[in-house]
Amino acid sequence: NMVNHHIGYFNMVNKIGLFKENFHFCEYGAGVAPFATTLLNYIDKNSQIEITICDVNSDHFDFAKYRLNRIKNDHNFNNLKLNFLEIKPDSLPVFKNKIDATFCFEVLEHVPSPLSVVKNITNIKSPGSVYVENFIKHNELEDDDDGPDLPSARSERKDYYKYLHKNYNLMYPSHKESEENPNVTRVWQRNSL
């Protein structure tokens, strides 16, 4: 399961000390919100925590909303604030509060402008906050327009990573791997403004 495979990223965020009182987590392109639900294993039930999940309107997103509300109520997360933001095809979600950690997995290749997504996320990140992402390349050939990856997303890959290197410090992997490697998950920490 994908969450167990990536549990090390939660441990890394925990070591940075971000899982604290008034922590705000966002799962962008959440689907059924596997990371948001796993996060609840890392926090004290009495902590002031805010979780925001974002996705397009779908049965998966409806299930994620149901699932998180049920966990909140069944396990007495009394101070947990949940936000559900629908992503529209023609606009990005508007965030109301700063976010300490954002997880964005297997999403960027399906959006028209990954660069716009990361800029939108960066606007609500304080120095020291974390962005965990991967930018999968499903298509075998870069010019294969028949695969699930949007051509506009593929065309922004280089500018997307250029922007990340300018605004974040790469924490993992510890060495800079080629941004063309589609199988690498990266952990970035927002640099000082």
Image: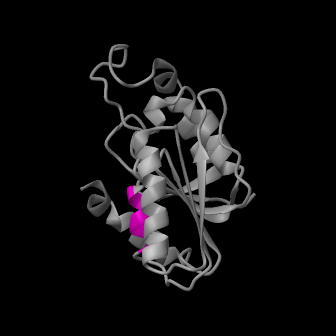
- Residue 146 falls inside the magenta stretch: no
Task: Considering the whole magenta stretch, tell me its main secondary structure.
Answer: helix
The colour scheme used here is one colour
Horizontal and vertical percent for residue 186?
A: 43, 52
Q: Residue at x 53, y 39 (%)?
A: 161
Quadrant where the N terminus sits is bottom left
Q: Is residue 147 above or below residue 29?
A: above
Residue 10 figure quarter: bottom left
Q: Is residue 173 visible?
A: no
Q: Nearer the viewer, residue 27 or 5?
A: 27
Q: Which residues are magenta?
A: 34-40
Q: Is residue 162 above or below residue 133?
A: above
Q: Is residue 13 above or below residue 193?
A: below
Horizontal and vertical percent for residue 140?
A: 27, 23
Q: Residue at x 53, y 76 (%)?
A: 19
Q: Is residue 55 visible?
A: yes
| Figure label count | 0
Left or right relative to 21: residue 4: left
Residue 37 figure quarter: bottom left
Q: Residue at x 36, y 19 (%)?
A: 142
Horizontal and vertical percent for residue 47?
A: 58, 83
Quadrant where the C terminus sits is bottom right
Q: In the displayed image of the protein, which residue is found farthest to the left?
A: 1
Horizontal and vertical percent for residue 97?
A: 72, 60
- Residue 36 falls inside the magenta stretch: yes
